[in-house]
Amino acid sequence: MATEPHLKIVIQPIGRVVQAGSEFRCKVFIKSEEDVDIRSIEASLYCIEGIKEKKELKRIVHWRETKLLAQEGIIRKDHPLAFKIEFQIPDNALPSAEGLRAHVHWCVETTVEDASGRVGVQRMPITVYNVPKSFEGRVFTEILDSINAQVRIKPIIARGTYTGGELTLYATKDIELAGIKVELVTLEETWNSRRTLEVLFKRTFRISDDKALKSGGTEKCDFNIPILPEIPPSYNGKHSRIRSYLILILERRGVDDYQILVPLWIF
Protein backbone atom coordinates (compact mmCIF):
# COMPACT_ATOMS: atom_id res chain seq x y z
CA MET A 1 0.00 0.00 0.00
CA ALA A 2 1.20 3.50 -0.86
CA THR A 3 -0.84 6.64 -0.31
CA GLU A 4 -0.40 10.39 0.02
CA PRO A 5 -0.28 11.56 3.67
CA HIS A 6 -3.31 13.83 3.26
CA LEU A 7 -5.48 11.00 1.91
CA LYS A 8 -7.03 8.05 3.71
CA ILE A 9 -8.44 5.30 1.49
CA VAL A 10 -10.34 2.38 3.01
CA ILE A 11 -11.51 -0.68 1.05
CA GLN A 12 -14.26 -2.63 2.77
CA PRO A 13 -14.93 -5.94 0.96
CA ILE A 14 -18.22 -7.80 1.24
CA GLY A 15 -16.49 -11.17 1.53
CA ARG A 16 -12.81 -11.69 0.66
CA VAL A 17 -13.25 -15.26 -0.65
CA VAL A 18 -15.08 -15.34 -3.99
CA GLN A 19 -15.98 -18.14 -6.39
CA ALA A 20 -15.13 -17.76 -10.07
CA GLY A 21 -18.19 -16.79 -12.08
CA SER A 22 -19.66 -14.81 -9.20
CA GLU A 23 -19.64 -11.15 -8.26
CA PHE A 24 -17.10 -9.44 -6.01
CA ARG A 25 -18.48 -6.41 -4.18
CA CYS A 26 -16.84 -3.86 -1.95
CA LYS A 27 -17.21 -0.35 -0.56
CA VAL A 28 -14.53 2.34 -0.85
CA PHE A 29 -14.26 5.31 1.50
CA ILE A 30 -11.94 8.25 0.74
CA LYS A 31 -11.18 10.96 3.26
CA SER A 32 -8.82 13.94 3.03
CA GLU A 33 -7.30 16.18 5.69
CA GLU A 34 -7.57 19.12 3.28
CA ASP A 35 -9.64 20.16 0.27
CA VAL A 36 -8.18 18.36 -2.76
CA ASP A 37 -8.85 18.91 -6.45
CA ILE A 38 -8.84 15.52 -8.15
CA ARG A 39 -8.34 14.37 -11.72
CA SER A 40 -9.74 10.90 -11.22
CA ILE A 41 -10.68 8.12 -8.82
CA GLU A 42 -10.44 4.56 -10.17
CA ALA A 43 -11.01 1.08 -8.79
CA SER A 44 -9.43 -2.03 -10.32
CA LEU A 45 -9.56 -5.76 -9.77
CA TYR A 46 -6.73 -7.80 -11.26
CA CYS A 47 -5.07 -11.22 -11.29
CA ILE A 48 -1.28 -11.64 -11.46
CA GLU A 49 0.53 -14.97 -11.86
CA GLY A 50 4.17 -15.36 -10.92
CA ILE A 51 6.03 -18.13 -12.76
CA LYS A 52 9.45 -19.09 -11.45
CA GLU A 53 11.82 -19.80 -14.36
CA LYS A 54 15.31 -20.72 -13.15
CA LYS A 55 16.18 -17.88 -10.77
CA GLU A 56 13.75 -15.31 -12.15
CA LEU A 57 10.11 -14.70 -11.28
CA LYS A 58 8.11 -13.82 -14.37
CA ARG A 59 4.85 -11.92 -13.73
CA ILE A 60 1.84 -12.22 -16.04
CA VAL A 61 -1.35 -10.16 -15.72
CA HIS A 62 -4.14 -12.59 -16.63
CA TRP A 63 -7.13 -10.37 -16.03
CA ARG A 64 -7.81 -6.76 -15.10
CA GLU A 65 -10.92 -4.59 -14.99
CA THR A 66 -10.90 -0.90 -14.09
CA LYS A 67 -13.87 1.29 -13.23
CA LEU A 68 -13.82 5.09 -13.24
CA LEU A 69 -15.52 6.24 -10.04
CA ALA A 70 -15.10 10.01 -10.36
CA GLN A 71 -13.18 12.66 -12.29
CA GLU A 72 -12.55 16.42 -12.20
CA GLY A 73 -13.94 17.08 -8.74
CA ILE A 74 -13.07 18.06 -5.18
CA ILE A 75 -12.67 15.98 -2.04
CA ARG A 76 -13.76 18.30 0.76
CA LYS A 77 -12.04 18.22 4.12
CA ASP A 78 -14.02 16.12 6.62
CA HIS A 79 -16.57 15.16 3.94
CA PRO A 80 -15.51 11.64 2.89
CA LEU A 81 -16.58 10.08 -0.39
CA ALA A 82 -18.16 6.63 -0.49
CA PHE A 83 -18.55 4.26 -3.44
CA LYS A 84 -20.12 0.83 -3.93
CA ILE A 85 -18.24 -1.26 -6.49
CA GLU A 86 -19.05 -4.55 -8.23
CA PHE A 87 -16.79 -6.71 -10.40
CA GLN A 88 -17.93 -9.81 -12.30
CA ILE A 89 -15.24 -12.48 -12.03
CA PRO A 90 -15.02 -14.70 -15.16
CA ASP A 91 -16.18 -18.33 -15.03
CA ASN A 92 -12.73 -19.51 -16.14
CA ALA A 93 -10.80 -17.28 -13.73
CA LEU A 94 -7.45 -18.58 -12.55
CA PRO A 95 -7.80 -19.36 -8.83
CA SER A 96 -5.53 -17.94 -6.14
CA ALA A 97 -2.40 -20.02 -5.45
CA GLU A 98 0.25 -19.91 -2.73
CA GLY A 99 2.71 -22.69 -3.54
CA LEU A 100 6.48 -22.94 -3.77
CA ARG A 101 6.35 -22.32 -7.52
CA ALA A 102 2.72 -21.41 -8.20
CA HIS A 103 1.88 -17.83 -7.25
CA VAL A 104 -1.48 -16.38 -8.32
CA HIS A 105 -2.71 -13.27 -6.55
CA TRP A 106 -5.98 -11.36 -6.90
CA CYS A 107 -6.11 -7.79 -5.66
CA VAL A 108 -8.61 -4.94 -5.52
CA GLU A 109 -7.03 -1.51 -5.84
CA THR A 110 -8.28 2.07 -5.50
CA THR A 111 -6.29 4.95 -7.03
CA VAL A 112 -6.83 8.66 -6.42
CA GLU A 113 -4.92 11.16 -8.59
CA ASP A 114 -5.08 14.82 -7.59
CA ALA A 115 -4.68 17.87 -9.84
CA SER A 116 -0.94 18.12 -9.17
CA GLY A 117 -0.35 14.54 -10.29
CA ARG A 118 0.12 13.07 -6.83
CA VAL A 119 -1.37 9.61 -6.51
CA GLY A 120 -2.84 7.80 -3.51
CA VAL A 121 -3.21 4.03 -3.77
CA GLN A 122 -4.77 1.41 -1.51
CA ARG A 123 -4.69 -2.32 -2.27
CA MET A 124 -6.33 -5.33 -0.68
CA PRO A 125 -5.81 -9.00 -1.61
CA ILE A 126 -8.77 -11.32 -2.08
CA THR A 127 -9.04 -15.06 -2.70
CA VAL A 128 -10.69 -16.45 -5.84
CA TYR A 129 -11.45 -20.17 -6.08
CA ASN A 130 -12.64 -22.29 -8.97
CA VAL A 131 -13.85 -25.81 -8.17
CA PRO A 132 -13.66 -28.49 -10.91
CA LYS A 133 -16.87 -30.45 -11.50
CA SER A 134 -15.05 -33.67 -10.55
CA PHE A 135 -15.17 -32.56 -6.90
CA GLU A 136 -18.95 -32.51 -6.66
CA GLY A 137 -19.14 -36.11 -5.34
CA ARG A 138 -19.48 -36.86 -1.64
CA VAL A 139 -19.07 -40.68 -1.43
CA PHE A 140 -15.80 -42.51 -2.11
CA THR A 141 -15.62 -46.33 -2.18
CA GLU A 142 -12.54 -48.58 -2.02
CA ILE A 143 -12.71 -52.38 -2.45
CA LEU A 144 -9.83 -54.14 -0.67
CA ASP A 145 -9.01 -57.84 -0.29
CA SER A 146 -10.48 -58.25 3.23
CA ILE A 147 -12.64 -55.20 3.58
CA ASN A 148 -14.73 -52.72 1.61
CA ALA A 149 -14.51 -49.10 2.70
CA GLN A 150 -16.86 -46.20 2.07
CA VAL A 151 -16.05 -42.59 2.94
CA ARG A 152 -18.76 -39.94 3.11
CA ILE A 153 -17.33 -36.44 3.14
CA LYS A 154 -17.82 -32.96 1.76
CA PRO A 155 -14.72 -32.65 -0.46
CA ILE A 156 -14.95 -28.87 -1.04
CA ILE A 157 -13.77 -27.09 2.10
CA ALA A 158 -12.81 -23.58 3.19
CA ARG A 159 -9.60 -22.98 5.09
CA GLY A 160 -10.08 -22.21 8.76
CA THR A 161 -12.98 -24.70 9.05
CA TYR A 162 -13.32 -28.45 9.65
CA THR A 163 -14.06 -31.33 7.31
CA GLY A 164 -16.31 -33.88 8.96
CA GLY A 165 -16.73 -37.34 7.50
CA GLU A 166 -17.84 -40.90 8.13
CA LEU A 167 -15.82 -44.03 7.38
CA THR A 168 -17.81 -47.26 7.04
CA LEU A 169 -15.99 -50.60 6.89
CA TYR A 170 -17.62 -53.78 5.54
CA ALA A 171 -15.53 -56.85 6.40
CA THR A 172 -15.46 -59.60 3.77
CA LYS A 173 -13.14 -61.73 5.97
CA ASP A 174 -12.21 -61.78 9.64
CA ILE A 175 -9.71 -58.97 10.13
CA GLU A 176 -7.91 -57.20 12.97
CA LEU A 177 -6.87 -53.57 12.67
CA ALA A 178 -4.18 -51.99 14.86
CA GLY A 179 -5.82 -48.60 14.47
CA ILE A 180 -7.11 -46.04 11.97
CA LYS A 181 -5.29 -42.82 11.07
CA VAL A 182 -6.06 -39.93 8.75
CA GLU A 183 -3.30 -38.02 6.97
CA LEU A 184 -4.03 -34.60 5.49
CA VAL A 185 -1.47 -33.95 2.73
CA THR A 186 -1.04 -31.04 0.31
CA LEU A 187 1.21 -31.53 -2.73
CA GLU A 188 2.46 -29.18 -5.44
CA GLU A 189 3.28 -30.68 -8.83
CA THR A 190 5.07 -28.61 -11.49
CA TRP A 191 6.00 -29.42 -15.09
CA ASN A 192 7.68 -26.29 -16.41
CA SER A 193 11.34 -27.06 -17.26
CA ARG A 194 11.17 -30.38 -15.37
CA ARG A 195 8.59 -32.32 -13.40
CA THR A 196 8.73 -31.93 -9.61
CA LEU A 197 6.56 -32.93 -6.66
CA GLU A 198 6.77 -31.07 -3.34
CA VAL A 199 4.99 -31.70 -0.03
CA LEU A 200 3.57 -28.35 1.16
CA PHE A 201 1.66 -29.60 4.20
CA LYS A 202 1.27 -32.89 6.08
CA ARG A 203 -0.43 -33.74 9.36
CA THR A 204 -1.61 -37.04 10.85
CA PHE A 205 -4.63 -37.64 13.10
CA ARG A 206 -5.50 -40.90 14.90
CA ILE A 207 -9.26 -41.45 14.80
CA SER A 208 -9.55 -45.00 16.20
CA ASP A 209 -7.60 -47.61 18.17
CA ASP A 210 -7.47 -51.35 17.42
CA LYS A 211 -10.57 -53.05 16.06
CA ALA A 212 -11.53 -56.67 15.33
CA LEU A 213 -14.10 -57.21 12.57
CA LYS A 214 -15.82 -60.50 11.79
CA SER A 215 -16.66 -61.47 8.22
CA GLY A 216 -19.92 -59.77 7.26
CA GLY A 217 -19.57 -57.23 10.08
CA THR A 218 -19.81 -53.46 9.74
CA GLU A 219 -17.94 -50.74 11.62
CA LYS A 220 -18.50 -46.98 11.43
CA CYS A 221 -16.06 -44.30 12.47
CA ASP A 222 -16.67 -40.53 12.43
CA PHE A 223 -13.86 -38.01 12.07
CA ASN A 224 -13.46 -34.24 12.12
CA ILE A 225 -10.23 -32.83 10.65
CA PRO A 226 -9.20 -29.14 10.94
CA ILE A 227 -8.38 -27.37 7.67
CA LEU A 228 -5.86 -24.86 8.96
CA PRO A 229 -5.57 -21.37 7.41
CA GLU A 230 -1.92 -21.98 6.44
CA ILE A 231 -2.82 -24.83 4.07
CA PRO A 232 -2.34 -23.58 0.48
CA PRO A 233 -5.58 -23.45 -1.56
CA SER A 234 -6.11 -25.99 -4.33
CA TYR A 235 -5.05 -24.84 -7.77
CA ASN A 236 -5.02 -26.00 -11.41
CA GLY A 237 -2.68 -23.99 -13.66
CA LYS A 238 -0.80 -24.28 -16.93
CA HIS A 239 2.53 -24.95 -15.23
CA SER A 240 1.60 -26.47 -11.88
CA ARG A 241 -1.17 -27.69 -9.65
CA ILE A 242 -1.73 -27.86 -5.90
CA ARG A 243 -3.86 -30.70 -4.55
CA SER A 244 -4.88 -31.83 -1.06
CA TYR A 245 -5.82 -35.36 -0.04
CA LEU A 246 -7.15 -37.21 2.95
CA ILE A 247 -5.40 -40.57 3.24
CA LEU A 248 -7.29 -42.93 5.55
CA ILE A 249 -4.86 -45.56 6.81
CA LEU A 250 -6.16 -48.87 8.19
CA GLU A 251 -3.19 -50.18 10.20
CA ARG A 252 -2.51 -53.91 10.15
CA ARG A 253 0.04 -55.90 12.16
CA GLY A 254 2.81 -57.61 10.23
CA VAL A 255 1.48 -56.73 6.75
CA ASP A 256 1.06 -53.61 4.64
CA ASP A 257 -1.57 -51.12 5.78
CA TYR A 258 -4.68 -50.43 3.74
CA GLN A 259 -4.87 -46.88 2.37
CA ILE A 260 -7.89 -45.00 1.03
CA LEU A 261 -7.19 -41.82 -0.94
CA VAL A 262 -9.84 -39.07 -0.89
CA PRO A 263 -9.17 -35.93 -2.99
CA LEU A 264 -10.17 -32.57 -1.50
CA TRP A 265 -10.58 -29.09 -2.94
CA ILE A 266 -9.53 -26.46 -0.41
CA PHE A 267 -10.13 -22.74 -0.86
Image (cartoon, grey):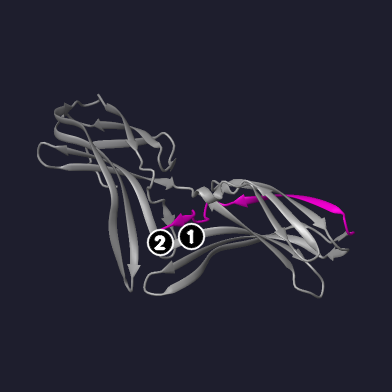
Along the horizontal axis of the image, is 244 left or right of 63? Answer: right
Residue at the left extreme of this rendering: 116
Which quadrant of the structure image shows residue 44?
top left
Q: 4 or 242, which lies in front?
A: 242
Asked if the residue under mark 2 is in contact with the one under mark 1, i.e. CB atoms within 8 Å, the reply is: yes
Is residue 215 rendered magenta in the image?
yes
Check disc 1 and report its element: helix, strand or loop.
strand
How much space separates mark 1 and mark 2, taking CA atoms?
8 Å
Residue matched to label 2? 102
Is residue 233 rendered magenta in the image?
yes
- Identify which residue is drawn at 77% across, 58% down: 148
Amino acid under disc 1? Ile
Q: Position of residue 62 (x, y in %)?
A: 30, 52
Along the horizontal axis of the image, is 206 left or right of 235? Answer: right
Q: Position of residue 230 (x, y in %)?
A: 52, 55
- Identify which residue is drawn at 57% across, 52% down: 228
Residue 4 seen:
no
The residue range painted magenta reads 214-238
How many labels sit on residues?
2
Q: Position of residue 113 (x, y in %)?
A: 16, 39
The mark nearer the N terminus, 1 or 2, is 2
Along the horizontal axis of the image, is 165 left or right of 214? Answer: left
Amino acid under disc 2? Ala
Residue 29 seen:
yes
Q: Is residue 213 above or below residue 116?
A: below
**Badge 2: few (under 14), some or many (20 or more) residues near its Cα, within 10 Å?**
many
Q: 102 or 120, which lies in front?
A: 102
- Identify which residue is drawn at 11% across, 42% down: 117
Q: Please give the label number shown on residue 37.
A: none
Residue matched to label 1? 242
Q: Position of residue 64 (x, y in %)?
A: 27, 46
